[in-house]
Image (tube, helix red, strand yellow):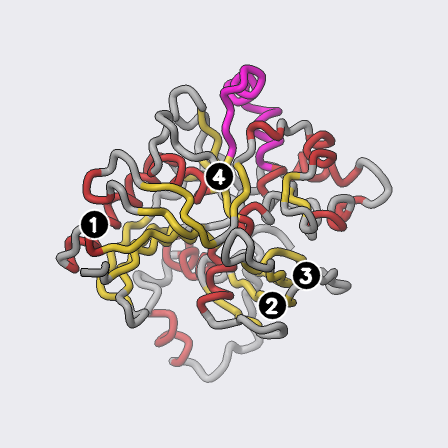
Amino acid sequence: MAPAYVLSIDQGTTSTRALLFGKDGQPKAKDQLDLTQHYPQPGWVEHDPKEILDAVVKCCESAMSKAGASKDDVAAIGITNQRETTIVWDRTTGEPLYKAIVWLDLRTSETAAKLCGKGPKGKDKFRKKTGLPISTYFSAVKIKWLLDNVPEVRTAADEGRCMFGTVESWIIYNLTGGKDGGLHITDISNASRYMLMNLKTHSWDEEICKQLEIPVSTLPEIKSNSEVYGHVKGFGQLDGLPLSGALGDQHAALLGQGCLDKGASKNTYGTGCFMLMNTGSEAVSSHSGLLTTIGFKLGKDAPTTYALEGSVACAGRTVQWLRDNLGVIQDPAETEAMALSVEDCGGGALPPAFSGL
């Protein structure tokens, strides 16, 4: 009998989920685990790469068990993930060399400022090639910080042992064998968020890598969003399943919301809030501060769809702050009832500028 399910991994900023989708496109089973947030210093946000991997495997196995499904019932695995969050690990041991630096982490502010200060174009010096301004958000700045500030990472890079990647790279590497032949790859949507990928060539820009002193050899190979990358190796219940797709979370949302035509847009709310608009086959430059990025590329030889993006760093994270820091709610669901209990806000407003204005 043909497999009845597709297994989807959704690795987010605050939790990890796995969902089994049936042939009708509807979820049939799921599991979810919260992800520990580490705040070693003000403005710093880290995740444990091993906790991420462990949660991915547990959620996948649990979702399959809830549906009574074996690996023979699953056609393939797809991955979507928090973007820009950067992980570095050792090619020889497969072990992380540092905790994952999360996309909204601000430790790279000084690094970004120094990069902006070199040359006349300031923060836009790489925008023409990458579509992105110099910002603490993007993986390249986090990679540079790691190379400049963590001796173990610099040594590993000098010795050819260093591997950088975003979350999907870390998951795919481990699921396909880790240090025993695991694949070091990324998909084109996640690659477009490094501030190192040339939007025209879809490859790492050697000139930018040289300026940032990031060895191209430490970066993953760029693949499309839809192709069989490899197969799961060494994870019992998942063994042999093909890994056949990966997209950054907001690109996956653009596709999932059906924005297949030029001009179609979506706005989704999670940890942050993100608007993406499909611009078709053209990488459109914005005159209003939006980012030029990849939308999706659905196959090795498929055309590339581009997008414009606007973002607000803190949306759901603000609700978490109301619960965990301010202590005015116990459960996020309480916020709606509280908002409806008053006639208006009385002239007060809370800009969720936890990453700065």
Q: How far, Cα to Cα, is label 2 from label 4? A: 25 Å
- Reading the chain from its start, which is encountered first: label 2 or label 1? 1
Residue kind at label 1, given as amino acid type = Lys
**Residue 344 locus on image (x, y percent):** 50, 81
Name, please, the residue furthest toward the right: 120
Numbered label attached to residue 185: 4
Q: Which quadrant of the figure contains the C terminus?
A: bottom right
Instruction: Name the residue that disc number 1 marks.
Output: 71
Numbered label attached to residue 290: 3
Residue 152 painted magenta: yes
Magenta segment, which residues?
142-164
124 on left or right of 17: right
- Asked if residue 119 can be seen in this view, the reply is yes
- Reading the chain from its start, which is encountered first: label 2 or label 3? 2
Query: 10 Å neighbourhood of mark 4: few (<14), some, or many (≥20)?
Result: many
Q: How far, Cα to Cα, is label 2 from label 3? A: 13 Å
Magenta stretch: dominant SS? Answer: helix
Could you say whether the residue bearing mark 4 is in a helix, strand or loop? Answer: strand
Residue kind at label 3, given as amino acid type = Leu
Q: Residue at x 58, y 65 (%)?
A: 276
Residue kind at label 4, given as amino acid type = Ile
Residue 279 painted magenta: no
Instruction: Name the residue that disc number 2 marks.
Output: 278
Q: How far, Cα to Cα, is label 4 from label 3? A: 27 Å
